[in-house]
Amino acid sequence: MTKKTIITLISLGAVLLLLIAAYVIVQVTKPKPAETKPPELLSPDKLGENDPGEELDAGVRILIFPRRDRTMIKSISVHNEHGDYSVTAKGDGTFSLDGFEGAYLDDQKTASLVVTAGYTVTSQRVVDEATDEELENYGLAEPSAWWVLTDTSGREYRVNVGDRMVSGDGYYCSFEGRRAVYVLSNTLETSVLMPAEYYVTPLLVLGLTNENYYQVDEFTILHGKDELFVSVAKCDDDEKMNPDAVMEAKLIYPAGYKANDSYYLNVIGSLVSMTGLETAAINPTDEQYEQYGLKDAPYHVHFSMMGYDFNLFFSDEMEDGYRYGISYLYNYSLIARFNASDLAWLDSDLFSWAASYPLSVNITTVDSLRVVTEENDVTFALNHGVDGEGRATLDVESDAGVSFPNGDIYNFRQFYKSVIAAKIKGTSSLTDEEKKELTSDEKNAIVHVIFSLSDGRKFDYGFYRASTREALMTVNGEGVFYINSDNPEKVAADLVRLLNGIEIDAYGKD
């Protein structure tokens, strides 16, 4: 071994010895972790008569009284600035609001109340035995809020809620009959300090589901007390344009129109989840009716289903940006708050409720079709039958001397397509007086199309020129909507073509 190698090994050994010495010094001088002692519980002399005393939670935190979980609670009674209310266990792990047993309580919010009221874990005990002055300073001499938990054995536990801490970290609280002062967390703000309405699910409708809402028989909106805005009814099977459709609807008001099924289904489908943002009031006072714009509710919704009638009332959009609705469920009334946009259908244009093609009448349901223009007045009799192979046939005769046997029916069918192509463009801007003046003179009529159906119903669709581009459309004399005048003008022109044996292009412009 060389001299250089020996020197290197000696040096490494010295470094190793220094590292070992340093480690020993650090371990000896390193501060030992402080031993945490569990908090001391109040001695019996500081407890009130028949006081259950404190309890340790996991050995490190104090419970104001021994924990009462959901299975051990009979009822919780609350008093706060909003009033008094109680919830009572129903025996199945859920709770009901006393006096409103039919109300649906929000599971999450009710669970928060149950946990807060029964699990009184405190971040600190501020005073073991407060003086009268200290109780006054903490807002506990005459507390403005408290709750009483009654367990299944009948024992009561009352906790008083005093002032909010200046830091905002919690509230000063005390156990009734005990002079100790504790701090409970801000969970009080979303439980025992909330009004009863907070726990009630803001439902306005019960009984409708995604499986049955399309079975609504009749749906009506009134503006004000008695101004009928729109009324929709489910079509009977023999009225359906598509016999296989699950549901088709018709307008009862304004009469004579097929409903816009898509729009209507969206509206009544929203009733299934007619749940507001929150419950604003239960059994409201006159002042609350006024406050929420429901004293003389501007919107009344009525619908019937399976023999039951439902009535809902809604406000306009209020200053706070919300709309409010009220309904009467079981033996109580409830006001719910809604986003205004969720109820836009209450005052949507009437045009939204009508099918775009109101004359879209299934030809197989038509017995006769009469078309009246300034130059012609022709009635077509439609004779429906079945051939030897079971296929539907159609023969058409007219009082104008022209006929269309089943084998030569194409041109009539093209004409029929022109007739039913009338498309609503919007709600007429004419006043009632202007409509009356326009329709009182038949010289203003471009065409009348009159359907006589096999079920005995009769519809007279009239089209009156209101301007160069617009024609007021009437059904049995009543006008609500307008269409482009091009369509009735084409029907009048195609009638001439049909009578003169000229081929018709139903999709042509003229």
Image (cartoon, grey):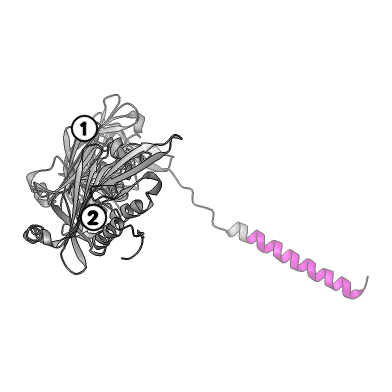
Give coordinates of residue 260: x percent, y percent.
28, 50
What is the secondary structure assignment of the residue under circle 2? helix
**Is residue 179 visible to the viewer in this orientation of the structure?**
no
Residue under the point 36% across and 29% down: 71
Circle 1 — which element?
Answer: strand
Q: Quickly name the residue at label 2.
A: 344
* Residue type, label 1: Tyr
**Between residues 194 and 382, which one lies in front from this camera angle?**
382
Q: Name the spot of residue 348 as percent of width and height, x first.
A: 21, 56
Q: Are marks 2 and 1 in contact (CB under 8 Å)?
A: no
Q: Amino acid at mark 2?
A: Ala
- Pick out the residue farthest to the bottom: 4
The residue segment tinted magenta is 1-25
Residue 423 location (% of width, % of height): 27, 58
In the image, taking residue 366 as reference, residue 505 lies left or right, namely: right
Q: In front: 327, or 113?
A: 327
Instruction: Give the label on residue 227, or none.
Output: none
Q: CA distance from mark 2 to mark 1?
A: 25 Å
Residue 15, magenta (yes or no)? yes
Which labelled disc corresponds to residue 308?
Answer: 1
Q: Quadrant for the N terminus, please.
A: bottom right
**Is the magenta region chiefly helix, strand or loop?**
helix
